[in-house]
Amino acid sequence: MDTLQQILKSYYGYDTFRPMQEEIIRHILQGKDALVLMPTGGGKSICFQIPALMLNGTAVVVSPLISLMKDQVEALRANGIQAETINSGNDESKNRIIRERCLQGEVKLLYISPERLMTEIAWMSQGLKISLFAIDEAHCISQWGHDFRPEYTQLGILHDKFPTVPVIALTATADKITKTDIVERLRLQNPQLFIGSFDRPNISLDVKRGYSAKDKIRTIMSVIKRHSHESGIIYCLARKTTEKLAEKLRAYGVLVGIYHAGLSMEERDKVQEDFVNDRIHVIVATIAFGMGIDKSNVRFVIHYNLPKSIESFYQEIGRGGRDGLATETLLFYNVQDLITLRRFVDESGQKEINLEKLKRMQEYAEAQVCRRRILLNYFNETAERNCGNCDVCIAPPKHFDGTEHVQKALSAIMRTKEQIGFTLTAEILHGTYSGEVTAKGYQLLKTFGAGRDVPFRDWQDYLLQMLQMGFLEIAYNEDRHLKVTPLGKEVLYGRKRAELAVIEREDLRVKSHKERQYKLGKKEETNTEKAENKILFERLRELRKQIAEANHWPAYIVMSDKSLHALATERPTTLQAFGEIFGIGQHKRDAYGERFIAVIQEFTDTIEETALNMPINSESKATSVLCKNDTHR
């Protein structure tokens, strides 16, 4: 085993590198600059952490948020790696001690914000041996990036002050213009561009179209129940929506927190801390939340509203399933989201490019082909086959001849002289005597009630499909009224036929997505000699919680869910076997191994004793008895 493999195994507990990691590490060890583009959860950190361990001196890691720095430093220390952070959260005496430790060569990785780095450069340039600079979340340097931070633009001076130190820029999402901007603003010298695969097969993709607020709540609750005591994030477009949704979820007994820019820094920090430490299970947030989250065991990500771009959407869903286990994502999409986002685009300073990004997001939401292929194509990656893990692949849409439906809808719009929007059109077709319908006399139209046999919400969905197919367009400059397009008139006057997708409302008693969990995120039981024991998993999870609380760490820093699942399956009873488990390096083996082994041994002994005292040869039956006993303790 060469040095790289030894470090990977001894510090991180991994047997093999992920694609491109080793190539990037060897490139940096040669003292060369690099731009690394990898999805969230793709393993970017190891690309600069291992070179930092191998090179002389201290690696300086520039990171945008104190919470993110704290998280990474804690994770490194848990692996036995000397790491520190200089930030405004420390008192000055602590920062002074950290500087001295760096100068003495005792710190391998120093995390710092871009603003703070500018004030620390003086002492760094005088006596600190710097092995490399790693610029994390590098898209923040670009005005075209979705999280532009003016402070990042100062980082171009690094090569002036430290001409021989390699600089590695890392980001999860960056389009072509942002990549060019990063290279120019950081003044990277002949950097090699590394682009990892954006395919995250453990993440399922699902879109629900035209759902009412009531339908959304029922669906969200079904997801939460599927992931009982597991972590999830729900993104909303507006602050008010986060507060209303959180209030409804609390009424159902969900442990939920709110996060948006309208809260004080103290309130946001507390909510984030509670979420990271599993004191709350669900966080309802605007896009202000997420960049500082390195939590590996987020099991679902829901978008209550349509995101503004595929970059934002992909980064947000990427906050789920960072441990590689099966993770569920769900996007709700309706016309009102589109109208709201279009207004934001019109008010933005970059209308043309933001409009194009919104259109691509809309295309994804409306797609009737494999959604993962659309995402990968957006990031210039080609998939050879459908993923089998998105709603379109699992239940391909069925179609019917919807010409009559389309004609009725377009006729209603034309008879109002194209002066109505989506809701009024659906009310006219369904025959709803709403205040606006009667005030404008639309109940007298020939088409009023022409689609009475079709549910109101189905009409909303069909109208959305008509918009997607180009039969309608929204006049944003005319109070968002619907206009019939030339193609729509071809259908209206009988010169063309139109197909619509069959609307299939799901049974909200819901079949579990966890059927796919073993296929995608875990080993299938048929491929293992032992099956994972859920009781043992819970006992191991409780021990992990105790260790985390004693160290003031989030639980996933002690050990990932993936490692716990492996322990509950393999049940090692020696330190050597414990150290072979995925994600358990030498430091964790020595620090916690005996305690975890004791729990596993006690469980195994109890099963054997129970089995001996019963006229049963099946461990599963013995475990069943054990489970009953457990509930009465």
Image (cartoon, rainbow, N blue to C red):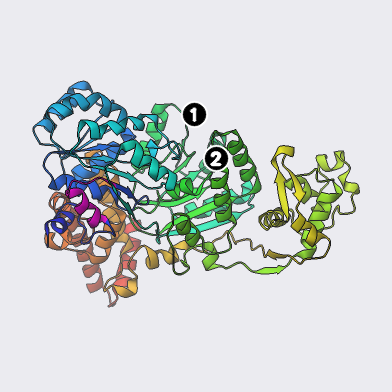
Kind of residue at disc 2: Leu
Give the camera-side residue of 445 and 128.
Answer: 128
Position of 126 with respect to 632 (left or right) is left
Q: Which residues are magenta?
A: 21-34
From the viewer's perspective, is residue 43 above or below residue 503? above
Task: Name the disc covering residue 237, or none.
Answer: 2
Task: Name the disc covering residue 177, or none.
Answer: none
Name the residue located 35 percent from the left edge and 36 percent from the top edge.
185
The prevailing secondary structure element of the residues shown in magenta is: helix
Dots 1, 2 in contact, CB < 8 A: no
Q: Between marks 1 and 2, how big is the CA–CA gap?
A: 13 Å
Quadrant of the drawing holding the C terminus: bottom left
Residue 245, x across and y down, in percent: 55, 41
Kind of residue at disc 1: Gly
Corner quadrant of residue 546: top left
From the viewer's perspective, is residue 24 above or below residue 64? below
Name the residue located 33 percent from the left edge and 62 percent from the top edge.
534
**Label 1 belongs to which residue?**
262
From the viewer's perspective, is residue 610 above or below residue 211? below
